[in-house]
Amino acid sequence: MSGTPLSRDKIVAEHLGLTYVDQGTPGHARSNAVLQDFSLSVREGEFLSVLGPSGCGKSSFLNILAGLVPQTKGDVRIDGQILTGVSRKLGVVFQGYALFPWRTVIENIEIGLEIRDVKRAERRAEATRFLALVGLQAYGNHYPHQLSGGMRQRVAIARALAYGPEVLLMDEPFGALDAQTRESLQSELLGIWEKSAKTVVFITHSIDEAIFLSDRVAIMTRGPGRVKEIIDIPLPRPRDDSVRNSTEFLALRQRAWAPLKTEVAEARDVPAQEQTRTVDA
């Protein structure tokens, strides 16, 4: 982060498998393999993006890390300890904001502090600090419906940080935003990350977004997904928008697209039913 050496592995996922079974017709079941032999390590303090074609299982991997979905094979370790469910070390930011509409902005941020059992007298001051971190000091008493999509996502990031996680899991958090807002929030996120010293696992379908934000990019195969290749992003930090037009950035874009384009093409060519198989119930 910011030019400092990266240290030990914070997260280690080994040989993960995830298969959903639809009972369907009595006597038969259809199984859909989403992840197969998926292995990935995330270093402490790094920003790692996971990039892959639609349906490759990248969001499913994040849901396993978040403790929302149990894998069917393999295991995940956080700081060397096997992950068995939801962990207080991990905070999640989803694409859909997930803000409570009846709570003001600052009250939404306080949810993370309530989970941590922070005393009521301290909550408002702490929430105000996170509100300032995402640049929304003037909007603490607004309700979510009064904010733009980009502002709502900044509130969601502040709430996740208030939870006090060591790792921030982000599932395409800017995917629903327009291009201008998206690029602006990417820059803001880098500033927040550099101040917070969190480990970040970021799910995206955008090559440019992955390169701009990350220390490394893990490229997945089409489903059932596994890690096909990991690309180092040696662009200097701190980064600003000017790096997007550099020859180094453009070369990295081509470097990332080369292994990805084959997977995208194959994902289009393979009928969905070929990824499912019938098994005896």
Image (spheres, grey):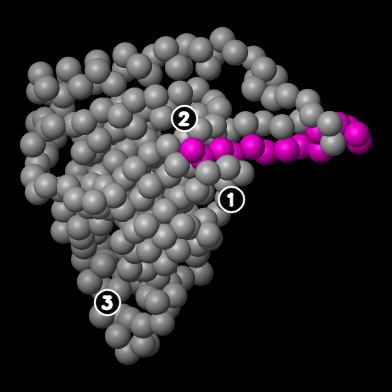
* Crowd tier of the residue under label 2, counting other residues whose Cα lies within 10 Å: few below 14, some 14–19, many 20 or above: many
Instruction: Name the residue carrying label 3.
Output: 126
Q: Where residue 31 appears, x then y in whole percent?
A: 71, 32
Instruction: Name the residue carrying label 2.
Output: 226
Quarter holding residue 270: top right
Answer yes or no: do the residues labelled 3 and 1 have beta carbons within 8 Å?
no
154 to the left or right of 184: right
Quarter holding residue 142: bottom left
Q: Where residue 166 appears, x then y in whole percent?
A: 31, 61
Q: Give the structural element (helix, strand or loop) at label 1.
A: loop
Instruction: Name the residue carrying label 1.
Output: 70
Residue 170, placed above or below residue 276: below
Looking at the image, which residue is at 55% across and 54% down? 68
Tag count: 3
Q: Give the structural element (helix, strand or loop) at label 3.
A: helix
Q: Nearer the viewer, residue 15 or 120?
A: 15
Residue 97, placed above or below residue 24: below
Mark 1 or mark 2: name the one nearer the start of the chain.
1
Mark 3 or mark 1: name the one nearer the start of the chain.
1
Q: Is residue 181 magenta?
A: no
Please report the bounds of the magenta region as a residue range.
15-29
